[in-house]
Image (cartoon, rainbow, N blue to C red):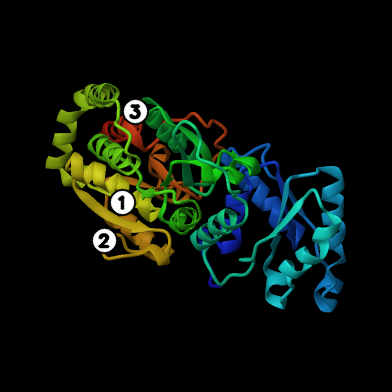
Amino acid sequence: MGLHRFRPVPSGRMGTLWTLASIRNAALLEFGCMGHMLYGRVFLNRTGVVDACKLYATHIDETDIALGDTGRLSRAVADIARRDKPRVLFLLPSAVPEIIGTDIPALCRELQPDCPDMRLLPFSNGGFDIGQYRGVQETLLHLVKTLPQNVPKTPLPTFNLIGSCADLFRFQADAGEIARILEGTFRIKPLCVMTSATSVEQIEQMGGAHVNLVFRREGVPAAEQLQKQFGTPYLLARPYGIQGTCEWIEQVAQITGITPDRGYVNGQRDEALRLISPALPSLRHLREQPENGRLSVGGHADVVKGILSFACGELSLPQGMCWCDSPSMADEDIPYFTEEEWTQAIESQGNGLLMASGEALKWAGRNMELQIANPDTVWRLNPYEPPFVGFRGAVHLVSLWINENLRKQ
């Protein structure tokens, strides 16, 4: 691994940890160094994930590594089963056990008979061979392959939201806006918000939903698995902007066969348009001054794409440099930038609008309110902050852009 001034691309292990850590009535045991879990817990606390999955680490020493001793793991499993009695215990290797080839699945099969009331569910991705988002993808898929039960569809229509995980910035607010719009438009409620607001029991009931709404591309394999197993259709989309949200609602209506409440949708659309209308003349002025109005965006590829569709599509703001934070998601429109490339890109855009991670904005001395991605630099304890998606997200984004323009003046 090379030297980095800022955070390198996180490993798949971190993606797995951030996906599992918000699941209630579960525990997670890492077979590895104590410090790994301590740092992971700090990140989760700062993102607002509290009182969910219980997190443990075994610690390892030279004897464990040299002799392949797994006694610590066995004792920890027994202790967690006795003290906490979680419904499921996730087991995750850290880098050292993964590299030396510790067979965690075999250990789970060996220990499972001693824990009849606690399911042992092993995960891999402890090494550095895959990145964060691949870890999220494989974890979501593994969960839906193993936990959902054969249940009938719910009497009233319900949905699963797949891909709302703690690694995304402001994940709770965005999931809340999705649920609000769907309940008002279709009278449908979430069965499982996977995984930012869910429990083991809710994951077990996922087959009862009438539609799966995939919030990020990493959730597609999980949705395909649920479609194969339960026949549940799915939609991959993140609704940004006013027009974009209306189009997303029509897609949901088409895939579910439920007629939307046009009065509710029109009321939400008109309210959003009314709220942003005073700022539209100033936005037109930004279009005439691209050196100030050029919008540069860096973060998760789906987030970058959605924000650009609203800013540069609906509102016609000039586009600056845009990039994603994962090489596996790069394409011609949104390339992946290394640390050196995104720092150069930010410097090249001068006084334009910049939306990126907290560490990038802090380094550049820019407005931290325009953060759209992790890594963060502050605590996020309030799950009710304004979203970026949906009708309220559109109003929030316009407010950020117009006030940033005033601040620079």
The CA distance from mark 3 to mark 1 is 25 Å
Who's the residue at 32% across and 38% down the image? 257
Label 2 residue SS? loop
Q: Residues within 10 Å of mark 2 (few under 14, many from 20)?
A: few
Relative horizontal placement of residue 96, taking residue 283 as reference (left or right):
right
The CA distance from mark 3 to mark 2 is 33 Å
Determine which residue is flagged by label 3.
185
Relative horizontal placement of residue 236, taking residue 148 as reference (left or right):
left
Mark 2 or 1, nearer chain start: 1
Relative horizontal placement of residue 197, taking residue 105 as reference (left or right):
left
**Residues marked 3 and 1 touching at CB (< 8 Å):** no
Give the percent coordinates (x, y) of residue 110: 81, 66
User: Label 2 sits on what residue type?
Assistant: Asp
**Residues marked 2 and 1 touching at CB (< 8 Å):** yes
In this view of the protein, which residue sits in the foreground, 51 or 405?
51
Question: Mark number for residue 333?
Answer: 2
Q: Is residue 291 visible from the viewing direction of this image?
A: yes
Determine which residue is flagged by label 1.
305
Mark 3 or 1, nearer chain start: 3
User: Label 3 sits on what residue type?
Assistant: Thr
Q: Residues within 10 Å of mark 3 (few under 14, many from 20)?
A: many
Question: Mark number for residue 208?
Answer: none
Q: Residues within 10 Å of mark 1 (few under 14, many from 20)?
A: many
Label 1 residue SS? helix
